[in-house]
Structure formats: structure tokens, C-alpha cells
Amino acid sequence: MKEVDLVIRGGKVVSPDRIVEASVAIAAGEIVALGHDDLMPPARETFQADGLYLLPGAIDSHVHFRDPGYPHKETWKSGSAAAACGGVTTVFEMPNTNPPTGTVEALRIKQRAAESSYVDYGIHGLLGDDTIDRLEELLEAGVTSFKAFVGNTFGNLPAPTDGALLEGFEKLAPLGIRTVVHAENSSIMARRQLRMEAAGRIDALAHLASRPAVCEIEAIGRVLALAEWTGARVHIAHHSSRDSLFLLREAKRRGVDVTVETCPQYLLLNTGDMTRLGGILRLNPPIREAHHNQPLWDALVEGVIDMIATDHAPHTPEEKSRANIWECDCGFPGVETQMPLMLTEINRGRASLMDYVRWSAANPAKAWGLYGKKGVIAVGAHADIAIVDLEREGVLSEGKLHSISKISPWNGRVVKGYPLHTLVRGRFVVRDGRLVEEAAGWGRSVKDVQRMPDPAPRNMETYMSNILATPAGVPPTATPRREAA
Ligand code: NCD
Ligand code: ZN
């Protein structure tokens, strides 16, 4: 048998439907054998993973690495280092940089910045009124997907008009390309915020009051209508409220190709944390009342929400700590803390480790056309692996984050379950909890391996028959999927 680069022995390999003790052989960045240790080829290096779990590296559909434009908040190097240390092996980066990723020229600048990445990446191009005519050339030049800021947020990019959104979807539907949508209603929020400011409200709760859940309900409903009409694939970013879940459940049942992410902050934090954390918790959509937390977990288990992303949105401590809530920048870093936070919940029995890899790796890989190469530990896949100690306990500390943004609502939080080693295409980018500095620049674009499945043909008749085929008031057909460990 031909000698391979690395064999990882003694660990338990996790997939969405099983956990098996298996050795993994890696050559030229790919998994070439998986199974009983006796069957492994000879290897130049052996890594003992006794007592540890091998998870497909997490795929984070939503990070802001700020580069170009805001290097004092984050760079590709610092952001991707944080990802690697958090067991994240692929990120999708957002276009609200400066310049925004809405022209080929701006994309080229970002691609050069991304050359310092530790982890693999996709780049979401900007879908806005003035980029509609450039979508094809942006795809040609390397974006994997698009992002529409339907709700106003950091960067103040104007929300696309409904006309532009429809046109964008009409162009992207036949190409099978998925568009991420920040689904909040900008006009409601702008009006409410003005009223709050006029009333002298500058407290953290005023931010939530300016962005009620109806903003999410309305925007999701509108986006789903346009997606269903055109057959375009869409992805709902940072889903935050229980009240709009019914729209997604119904749309999925009708066959709309919508994928949905939520983030640890919407699952684990609520307004009860606001007095303690103030402006640190300001983000979009807002952290809501406690009654939203459990329904979001339930929606993950049911499959209405597909995945965990982080909306890693770094700002400096100064930008996050201003006395007036309207002057605090929105968002906080998260790419490094997602895995320990979620593994802690898995350890508490909230879901299984198999559920977790479905949400963190398999489902995002499917949404972005990477499954098979990424999102799974299997022969032929990239060796993107997070080696995890489920027993390891610790306290999250913002000072230790690899992000430039050293401010986090998770500071001081007790966790159990850590990624200790991270491999990207067979190379250790983190080993024994330490970043492998020389691996900066190892990351590459996933564009070459992206294969979006052919889009289903859709037209007005299928749209109408789908609508008519959904009797009102029928309870959801999906039943919770909970595999036994
Ligand atoms: C994000 C940012 O800072 O770029 N902020 C946020 O509050 N979520 C933008 C975004 O994803 O909406
Ligand atoms: Zn957003």
C-alpha cells in the first residue's frame, strides 16, 4: 500500500447519523481511507486521538472579516485564525466591507486580502440595486453566492428595492445560486428608531423596541414570495424570532429552496442578559425575549432551521461600549466561541453530537454546494476536521480571542467541550489548542469545488399550484428528527 501523509487513530468519527470508532488516512489533503485501524495504509505521521471525537470542521455561512475597509476591527488573517481556533474550517464572508463586494474590482481587493486566510472560504457578493447588472461577472470572478441587506445594518448599505430583489432572483434562479438575506424591514426600523431617539431613549432595550419581530416576519414573507415566484434559492441569515418560523415551515413544505441559519446568541441569550451586557449585545436582528430561545432549538431539531452560523461581527471595545445605544456598533465576534458553546449544550443533553454536526457542517455544506468535498468525514472529502475533547472544561475569555475584537458577551461563560486540533485539507492549522502560525495563507476559495445542484424548473403555474395545494391551518408535517446516540 502506498504511504499516506497522516493517519489519525483512536478517535470517534461523527456524522449526522452515526458515531463510529475509526481511523482516518489522509493523503494530499483528502481522506483516502476510513475504517478499522488494521486496514490503514502506512503513514509518514500518526496522530493519536484516543478519547477524542473527530467532527467535520464547522462551516460558518456568516462571518464579517472587515477586510478591506476596517482593519482595526478585523483582518482576514485575524478572523480566520479565530475560525481555525474555533474548529471552523470554512467560512463564507460578507460583502459589507469598504469597498462593498459589489464590483469585480472590489472583489479582487478582497480576494487578495483572503490570501492570508488560515481556513477555506467562500465570498458572498453584494446584491443591491446597482449590482444587478454585474451578478454574472461577479460569479465569473469568484463569488460563490450573494447577500442582500434587506434590513439596514452595519455599513449602511441601502436595502435593495423589491424590484431589484425580484430582478436579482430572476437572474440567479436559473443559475441555482443561493442568496443570503438579512431579513428585516428597514422602513419600520428607521421610523421606530427615530421615535425612540426623539423620546430620549438611549438604553439597550430601545434597540430591540426599534426592531420588533414583525420586521422579521414581514421581510421573510416578502423574500419567500419572491423566491417562490422565481424559483431562486435563498438563505435566511441570523434567524432570531419564534414568530416567523411558521412562514419558513410552510415555505419548505411547499418546496421553496430556503435554508435558514440561527446563531448561538439567539439560542442562548435574551433580554435578561441586557442589563449586564448593555451595548455589547447590540446586534441585528436584536437579542429578544427569553420566550424565543426554546422555539429556535425546537426549529433546529425539526429541520425548519438548518444550521448554526455565527454572524461573527467584530468591533473594538470602544465601539461597543458607548453610553448611547444608538452609537454602539452592531454585532460582536463569534466564530471562535460557537463550537465550545454548542458542545456545552450537547453535553447538557439538549441535542446529540450527530445533530450538532448536521447543523454545523453537513447542512451548510449542502446549502452552498460543497457536500461530499466538505461537511463530512468520508473517503474523497477534504480532510477538514475538528478534533474535539468533549470532557474539557474551561471559561471563555475575551482577552484570549484571536479576533482583533476583544469584546464578547460570552466572556466568563463556563463551557465543556473544546476543539483541540483543527485540520484544513489535511494540514494542522491548530494543534494542541495553538494556532500554527506558518499555516496563514493555507486557506483557499471553495469556488473550485462548489457544485450547486441544478435548479428545479419553476414558473407561475407551479407557484400557484403550490400555494393552492397548501390547505390553511394544517399543522406541520415534519416530525422531530432525533437520532439515538
Ligand atoms: C453585522 C456587522 O457588524 O457587519 N452586524 C450585526 O449586528 N449583525 C451586519 C449584519 O450581519 O447584519
Ligand atoms: Zn445581517
Image: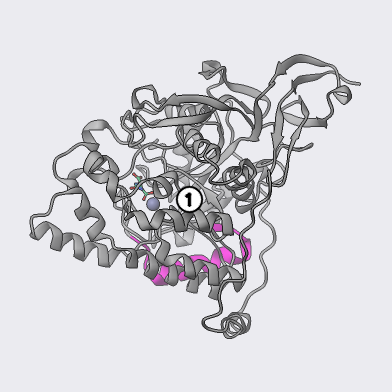
Judge whether residue 150 can be spotted in this image.
yes
Residue 437 coordinates in the image, percent (x, y)? 51, 17
Cβ of mark 1 under 8 A from ligand 2 = no
Q: Position of residue 88 (x, y in %)?
A: 54, 34
199 sits left or right of 333 in the view? left
Main secondary structure of the magenta stretch: helix
At horizontal 53% and vertical 36% (from top left) the residue drawn is 343
Question: What residue does disc 1 label?
Answer: 125
* Location of the C terminus (image quadrant): top right
Residue 333, percent from left and from top: 38, 36
Left/right of residue 177 with respect to residue 15 in the rendered view = left
Q: Is residue 369 above or below residue 229?
A: above
Q: What is the number of callouts on the image?
A: 1
**Residue 458, above or below 127:** below
At label 1, counting other C-alpha atoms closer than 10 Å, the crowd grade (few under 14, some 14-19, many 20 or more) is: many
Callout 1 amino acid: Gly
Q: In the image, what residue occupies the spot 22% across and 62% down?
A: 190
Q: Nearer the viewer, residue 35 or 332?
A: 35
Point 39% across, 68% down: residue? 217
Does the magenta-highlighted stretch encompass residue 2? no
Which residue is outermost to the top?
Answer: 44
Residue 363 location (% of width, % of height) = 61, 50
Magenta segment: 159-178
- Identify the secondary structure beneath mark 1: strand
Image side of residue 233 versus residue 208, left or right: right
Q: Is residue 260 visible?
A: no
